[in-house]
Structures are given as C-alpha cells and as structure tokens.
Image: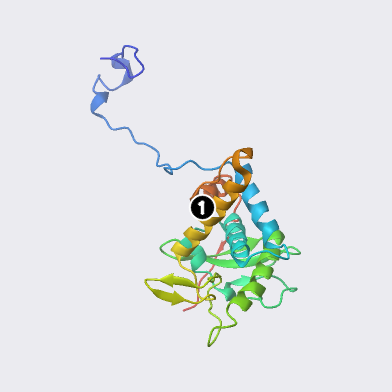
Amino acid sequence: MTHPEGAPRSHDSNDGNDGNDDHQVQPQAVRYPRPTVSLDEAEWVWRQLSVEALRPDGKPEIVRLAVIAGLTRATGARYGDLLRVRAEDLDLGPDDGAGRGRVGGVRAPGEGRVLVRHGKHRTLRRHRVPGEVVVVLRHWMVVRTELAAELQGSVPRALLLTVHHTHDNGTTVSSGLPITRQGLVLSWRRFVHRTNARYGATRPPLPTRFEQVRRAWTDAGMPDPGTSVHEAK
C-alpha cells in the first residue's frame, strides 16, 4: 500500500492497529468552512465603523453597523443574539440619557453593561461593554429615537431598527421598525462592497460574511464571557 504522500506505508504491529487502520475513521475537528480574518483585520473593521459612525455626517446604517461590531466584539454575540437585545437590556452608565437601561453590576468609569440572550436556548448573560462601544451606543440611541419618531404608537423595544423604508413581498416597511436577520446580512454586504471598492488593491478585501470577522474576536478571547443571569418570568 502507498502512503498518500508517496512513501510506502508500514504495517508494523507496533503501531497498535494490526494493519487495519484503513477501516478506522479518524475523528476530525469541526471547523468553520470559511477562512476567518486576522485579529488585526477585525480590529480595523471596528475602528473604521466606529470612526465613521461618530462623524457629523455619519449615516444611520453605519451607526447601526458600528453598534453590531462593537457589541459582537464585547460579547461574542451572533446576529440572532443581537436581534433579541432590547433597549432596556442596556445600561450605559450615569451620563447617558435615552439609552439608560436597568442592568445591574459594578462597572469601571465609562463602562456599560448589556444583557444578551445567547443561542437557541437563549441563555441570559450580563456582559461588560467597553467605553468606546458605549460612546457609539449612546449615539445610536439618539439616532434610534429619530428613526422611530414617525411611527404611530410607542417606540419598538428592539435595539436594532431599520434605517430605510424597505419592501418585503410587495409591502412597504417603514424605517424605525425592528430589523430582520436578512436585513443585517444585506447591510453588512453593502458596507463590504463599498469598502472593497474604495480601497481596491491597497488592502485585503473584506469577507461578505460577518461571521468571518466575529470569529476573529472570539478565537482571540476578546469578548467578555459575562455572568449568568436568571431572567424573571
């Protein structure tokens, strides 16, 4: 028998398989099928979004993307987890106005807290939010209120809202309503296409799937693991 690399394969009984290893299935580690960006690249994405979001002419969609990147970097949350975050799940500290939530815990100066319901079991955990993300979140809370101003009734509880009038199966959906997972996917892709076109060959292209960026942060252990919280029924 020939080894895959071309060298003869030994059937020495000392290997412990009596030459029958061809019939044994070796376990393989489960890996994400797409390449994860480097940590430096993921950090570049966060810096780019956070700077653009705080500019006077920053677009609401960029502010929302900065919130998504910042919360993902801080908590490791996936899209589905972020869609379950409500405005009252935030506590941005004593200096914020519209964004004040009811999340307890001792924090460092400038630091915030957020409750995230993780995974299909919606495991509730309280995470620390770094000061630089708190700044973006405070700005988003102002933008969020403006987006929902034209809606009849109360402002939606969801943290992440639509920023454009959209069409869903022929029906016009007003801005200021809770965004869907597909909306987050398309928003990230728009940012990627604009950024890749802007920088061209001067830097590596960004991936069209945000998960490839999220995993760079989680693999590096950057997100706060958080503490378990019992949610009152």
Q: Which quadrant is the N terminus positioned in? A: top left
Q: Nearer the viewer, residue 170 or 183?
A: 170
Residue at x 47%, y 71% (from the top left corner): 166
Residue 88 location, quadrant: bottom right
Q: Which residue is mark 1?
A: 210
Residue at x 63%, y 42% (from the top left corner): 40
Placement of 144 over or under 120, stated as above or below: below
Q: Position of residue 28 (x, y in %)?
A: 37, 36
Residue 182 location, quadrant: bottom left
Residue 115 location, quadrant: bottom right
Name the kind of residue labelled 1 in the image.
Answer: Phe
Q: Nearer the viewer, residue 107 or 180?
A: 180
Pointer 1: residues within 10 angstroms few (<14), some, or many (20+)? many
Residue at x 71%, y 59% (from the top left corner): 132
Q: Residue 118: in sight, yes or no?
A: no
Q: Position of residue 137 (x, y in %)?
A: 65, 67
Q: For this view, does 53 lie left or right of residue 181?
A: right
Residue at x 53%, y 65% (from the top left corner): 116
Q: Position of residue 26 (x, y in %)?
A: 32, 32
